[in-house]
């Protein structure tokens, strides 16, 4: 049995052994993939094989995959300037910070779309907003994530796509948390662009992709060489991309295990509620990623729980962020209208392919101790 229980897969997933092996092999592919000689061609072939694997994960065409340095860059590339006409950007209020910056859109041309108290984007508001600006002559650019990293809430991306396309707009979706957890098909989702990150699916950090629907173009953020069909300059991260390709293949196969992971998550939540009956499972009543649980404990401080669990050998994240010594609720929980007293006691537990029932037991044992301490001495535990 492992000495520790890693339950923070949404932050990053452990490197898969198959990925490690492929990366180690690829480190010897020293040729520049743009070189025409044999060494260059070997590196190029490895990249193109990975491109096919990533495309297959999404039912996309390999030539529509643009490799980037990760999810953040893929989001920034999606939100890069679009020439030719006036655009207005619409973002759901629970997007990842790399999307919420608005990329190259100005604040005046960016509108936040609210979410329900369960964290689902309000499509009626989106439709109303798009109507307004469509009349005003803007072209809408909308970004709506497939699933939220803090709560696991699944967004109605296909429904949003119908609204966005009806208004003549483009839809980007940050799918960084979805591979291996949800079936992903670009055509079924109806998106024009989709972001991925290798390290969330057992691949290496520093590799990701923006994947386009056929015919959709982007304005490069990095200009210079002609790599990635002139859409992202810079000599490719060959080993990282090779690892990403293997991780994408494994993620497609992992889908078969998503229900079993969901069952472990349900055991964890039932156990947590038995220990702390006043705790709230955030977004518990809507469709969520099977691996994610956001548990808000009234009267607790997330940091205290995270540290206490860490000392007991269990790794989870806080659903709130500490800035300048002041604990602030996450923008996601705030956008959902979760009361600050509850949001400050929210932890995110995220399971993955390596999670076993021992990990759930260890979590519940440690969680039980912490809640007992909290009840005995509310001020000390909080
Ligand atoms: N989008 C979401 C939903 C994420 O959870 C993350 C990672 O935390 C990112 C984007 C950024 O990805 P990367 O770490 O590869 O830059």
Image (spheres, rainbow, N blue to C red):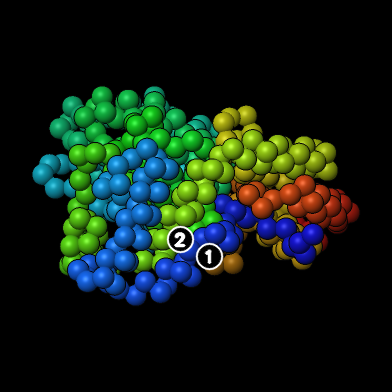
Q: Residue at x 56, y 47 (%)?
A: 150
Identify residue for label 2.
243
Q: Residue at x 32, y 55 (%)?
A: 48
Q: Secondary structure at mark 1?
A: helix
Name the image quarter holding residue 266: top right
Percent of width and height locating residue 41: 27, 66
- Judging depth in this view, the residue of 28 and 158 nearest the camera is 28
Mark number displayed over residue 232: none
Q: Residue at x 58, y 30 (%)?
A: 286
Tell me if I can see residue 278 in this picture: no
Contact flag, marks 2 and 1 (Cβ < 8 Å) = yes
Q: Is mark 2 within 8 Å of ligand 1?
A: no
Q: Is residue 226 left or right of residue 204?
A: left
Q: Residue at x 34, y 75 (%)?
A: 30
- Judging depth in this view, the residue of 257 and 140 nearest the camera is 257
Please identify the quadrant where the N terminus is shown. Answer: bottom right
Please identify the quadrant where the C terminus is shown. Answer: bottom right
Mark number displayed over residue 20: 1
């Amino acid at each position: 049995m492992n000495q520790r229980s890693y339950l923070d897969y949404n932050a990053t997933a452990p490197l898969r052994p198959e990925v490690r092996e492929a990366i180690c092999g690829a480190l010897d592919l020293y040729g520049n993939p743009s070189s025409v000689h044999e060494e260059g061609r070997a590196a190029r072939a490895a990249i193109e094989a990975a491109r096919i694997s990533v495309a297959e994960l999404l039912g996309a065409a390999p030539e529509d995959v643009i490799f980037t340095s990760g999810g953040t860059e893929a989001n920034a590339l999606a939100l890069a300037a679009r020439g030719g006409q006036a655009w207005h950007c619409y973002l759901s209020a629970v997007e990842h910070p790399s999307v919420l910056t608005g990329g190259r859109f100005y604040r005046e041309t960016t509108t936040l779309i609210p979410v329900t108290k369960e964290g689902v984007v309000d499509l009626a508001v989106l439709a109303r907003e798009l109507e307004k600006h469509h009349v005003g002559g803007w072209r809408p650019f909308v970004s709506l994530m497939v699933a939220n990293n803090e709560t696991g809430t699944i967004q109605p991306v296909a429904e949003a796509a119908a609204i966005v396309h009806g208004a003549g707009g483009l839809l980007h979706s940050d799918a960084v948390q979805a591979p291996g957890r949800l079936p992903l098909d670009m055509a079924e989702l109806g998106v024009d662009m989709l972001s991925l990150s290798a390290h969330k699916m057992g691949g290496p950090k520093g590799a990701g992709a923006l994947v386009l629907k056929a015919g959709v173009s982007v304005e490069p953020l990095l200009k210079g060489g002609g790599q990635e069909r002139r859409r992202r300059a810079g000599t490719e991260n060959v080993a990282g991309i090779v690892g990403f390709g293997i991780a994408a293949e494994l993620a497609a196969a992992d889908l078969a295990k998503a229900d079993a992971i969901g069952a472990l998550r349900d055991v964890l939540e039932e156990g947590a509620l038995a220990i702390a009956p006043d705790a709230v499972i955030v977004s518990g009543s809507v469709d969520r990623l099977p691996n994610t649980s956001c548990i808000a404990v009234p009267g607790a401080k997330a940091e205290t729980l995270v540290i206490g669990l860490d000392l007991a050998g269990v790794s989870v994240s806080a659903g709130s962020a500490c800035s300048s010594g002041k604990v602030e609720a996450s923008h996601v929980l705030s956008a959902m209208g979760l009361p600050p007293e509850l949001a400050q006691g929210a932890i995110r537990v995220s399971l993955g392919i390596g999670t076993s029932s021992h990990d759930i037991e260890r979590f519940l044992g440690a969680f039980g101790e912490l809640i007992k301490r909290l009840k005995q001495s509310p001020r000390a535990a909080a």
